Image (cartoon, rainbow, N blue to C red):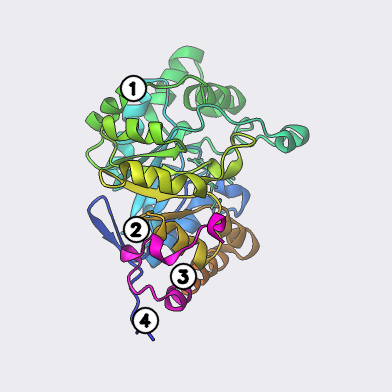
Amino acid sequence: MADTSKRKLETTLFGQKYATPLIQAPIGVQSIFNPNGEKGIAKICSELGIPFTLSTAASSTIEEVASAGRDGPRWFQLYWPTDDDITISLLRRARENKYNVLVVTLDTWSAGWRPLDLDSGYLPLVNGVGNQIGFSDPVFRAKFKEAHGIEVEDNTALASREWLKIILSGSVQPWERISFLKKNWPGPVVVKGIQHVEDAKMAVKFGCDGIIVSNHGGRQLDGAVGSLRMLQPIVEAVGKQTDVLFDSGARTGSDILKAFCLGAKGVLIGRPTMYGYAVAGEEGAREVFMGLLADLDQSMGMTGVTDLQASNTSTIVSSNEI
Ligand SMILES: Cc1cc2nc3c(=O)[nH]c(=O)nc-3n(C[C@H](O)[C@H](O)[C@H](O)COP(=O)(O)O)c2cc1C
């Protein structure tokens, strides 16, 4: 009998209000889904007020995506380069192009073992597709020219290898280096790929403004714990000190609602929008977002939740308790 006719789907992240709880997850190499790549999704996100997170491994440049996304909210995801001059250059470009949240991915210092990709030789980055942020970076270009005496365009295979050595190097930056990012980034710094309470505590200790509980869609470590399973313990440990977001496996409105009930403040959507984009272009991606939001709205009505931000564990029952 509860009146649920008016429902609020907005959320507040790092002190900023967003019209919906959704964020487009960083997905590399979007030109494999549609020739317009990241630009098409950035445009749709902008129309819907959904933050678009641009991957470092993009097939469009930081500037092109900013221009396609116009005045919509945009975030920049960093695969943290080994070369500080290049990191500073990427952050400067993102800042100047009005990306306002920095997402630092911590679960991909190198790519996971992906047998299907290896069997089929499917490695777009090695073949120069998805390196456009590096290839357009003035500092990377200058260093490449100094080392090899040629421009990036003269040997894109070599330039790809050099770029990948910098962004997917396999070497890890220690927690103490978060301060280096904070010195060069005035906005919120959010770490993505947290799956352990102790790591979440470290993120808070070293001043991160947010945490994305994610297992990279199960693509990095075979047998990794289900991301949703780790959400509640992490929220319990650090949810009062930092904003906790969730991804990996949200496919329906009730998935999003469950994540909020467990304490998430935002849910990143990765593959669903890419599938829509691959099947039906920008319209397809828009339909996926709109479908998820309509489903979420209905699911809130069904469960008696009128304000997503006020949802809590009283609305859900763990399968262990049934
Ligand atoms: C094709 C593909 C490319 C991805 N590229 C990136 C990336 O460049 N940076 C990143 O942080 N995460 C990347 N991810 C992980 C996503 O951001 C997200 O964590 C994952 O897909 C889980 O969300 P989903 O289940 O909604 O797809 C990628 C995932 C996929 C499927």
**Residue 82, image x, y percentages:** 42, 21
Residue 72 image-quadrant placement: bottom left
Separation (CA) of disc 2 from disc 3: 27 Å
Q: Is residue 303 magenta?
A: yes
Q: Residue at x 39, y 86 (%)?
A: 1
Separation (CA) of disc 4 from disc 2: 35 Å
Magenta residues, as a range?
296-322
Q: Give amino acid for label 4.
A: Thr
Horizontally, is 143 left or right of 122 in the view? left
Tell which tag, 4 or 1, sits nearer the viewer: 4
Tell which tag, 4 or 2, sits nearer the viewer: 4
Mark on residue 4? 4
Q: Which one is earlier in the sequence, the residue at label 4 or at label 1?
A: 4
Q: Nearer the viewer, residue 161 or 317?
A: 317
Q: Which one is earlier in the sequence, the residue at label 4 or at label 3?
A: 4
Separation (CA) of disc 4 from disc 1: 53 Å
Provide the residue designation for mark 1: 85
Element carrying mark 4: loop
Tell which tag, 2 or 3, sits nearer the viewer: 3
Provide the residue designation for mark 3: 296
Q: Residue at x 43, y 78 (%)?
A: 301
Q: Give amino acid for label 1.
A: Asp
Mark on residue 70? 2
Q: Which one is earlier in the sequence, the residue at label 4 or at label 2?
A: 4
* Tag 2–tag 1 contact (CB < 8 Å): no
Tell which tag, 1 or 3, sits nearer the viewer: 3
